[in-house]
Amino acid sequence: MTEELNMVYDEFKSSNEKSIEHFEAELTKIRAGKAAPAMLQSVMVDYYGSPTPIQQVANIGVMDARTLTVQPWEKDMLGELMKGIVNANLGFAPQDNGEMLIISIPPLTEERRRDLVKHAKAAAENAKVSIRSHRKDALDMIKGLKDDGLSEDMQKDAEGQVQTITDSFTKKIEELFELKEKDIMTI
């Protein structure tokens, strides 16, 4: 039975780690006023008739803390890159210098910072909901093991272990959110 319980724990931890990774990816999409290539991650460009992620047609770099550069691999893609960035509705106005696009990141207003914190909080809440869903699945698996001969004491211990794992992942989500909130609110 211990082997089956360990399998339940491992699967539970693995699912939770995926939730944490997804949450971290969501946080990178929330800009905190500093230029980062991940800000353009959602931009799609029309590349010879098919929508293509911007990373597959250009190099995205950081010139300084407030400036991104987008260097296309083919010069005739500059117009399409500009159109894709504008259509992504990120609030950027790229400038074309003939070689590359230069994007100045505008400073965030206090109101915009609060909106970004709300967005980060919503992402944190979604991650917690995901963790709780995984907890329910793990507890259901443990109840299934009880039918296969797991003692009541072992079931209670296993449920306690699942709750301990849940608490540790929830704490990690809170820590990540607090770091992002501090990053967003720092001027």
Image (cartoon, rainbow, N blue to C red):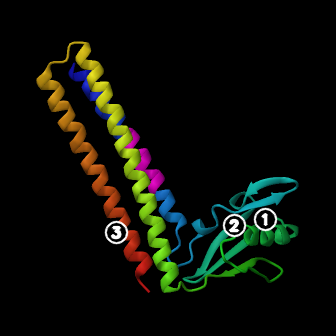
Q: Disc 1 and disc 2: Cα gap in Å?
A: 7 Å
Question: Which residue is depicted at the point 36% across and 45% down?
Answer: 131
Q: Residue furthest left?
A: 153
* Amino acid type of the residue that numbered disc 3 sits on in the rendered structure: Glu
Q: Residue furthest top?
A: 148
Residue neighbourhood size for the residue with mark 1, other residues' Cα within 10 Å, grouped as few (<14), some (14–19), many (≥20): few
Q: Name the side, left or right, on which 79 lies relative to 175.
A: right
* Amino acid type of the residue that numbered disc 1 sits on in the rendered structure: Trp
How far across and down, in percent of the image, does residue 26 sit? 50, 59
Question: Which residue is depicted at the point 36% across and 32% down?
Answer: 137
* Amino acid type of the residue that numbered disc 2 sits on in the rendered structure: Asn
Pointer 3 or 2: first along the chain: 2
Q: Residue 73: which numbered mark, if any? A: 1
Q: Quadrant of residue 11?
A: top left
How far across and down, in percent of the image, does residue 40 sit? 64, 67
Q: Which image quarter holds the C terminus?
A: bottom left
* Circle 1 SS class: loop
* Circle 3 SS class: helix
Q: Which residue is mark 3?
A: 178
- Chief SS of the magenta region: helix
Q: Disc 3 and disc 2: Cα gap in Å?
A: 31 Å
Q: Name the side, left or right, on which 182 lies relative to 46.
A: left
Judging depth in this view, the residue of 131 and 95 nearest the camera is 131
Residue neighbourhood size for the residue with mark 3, other residues' Cα within 10 Å, grouped as few (<14), some (14–19), many (≥20): some
Pointer 1 or 2: first along the chain: 2
Magenta-colored span: 14-23
How far across and down, in percent of the image, does residue 135 sit? 32, 38
Q: Marks 1 and 2: CB-CB under 8 Å?
A: yes
Q: Which residue is mark 2?
A: 59
Pointer 3 or 1: first along the chain: 1
Q: Quadrant of residue 69?
A: bottom right
* Circle 2 SS class: strand
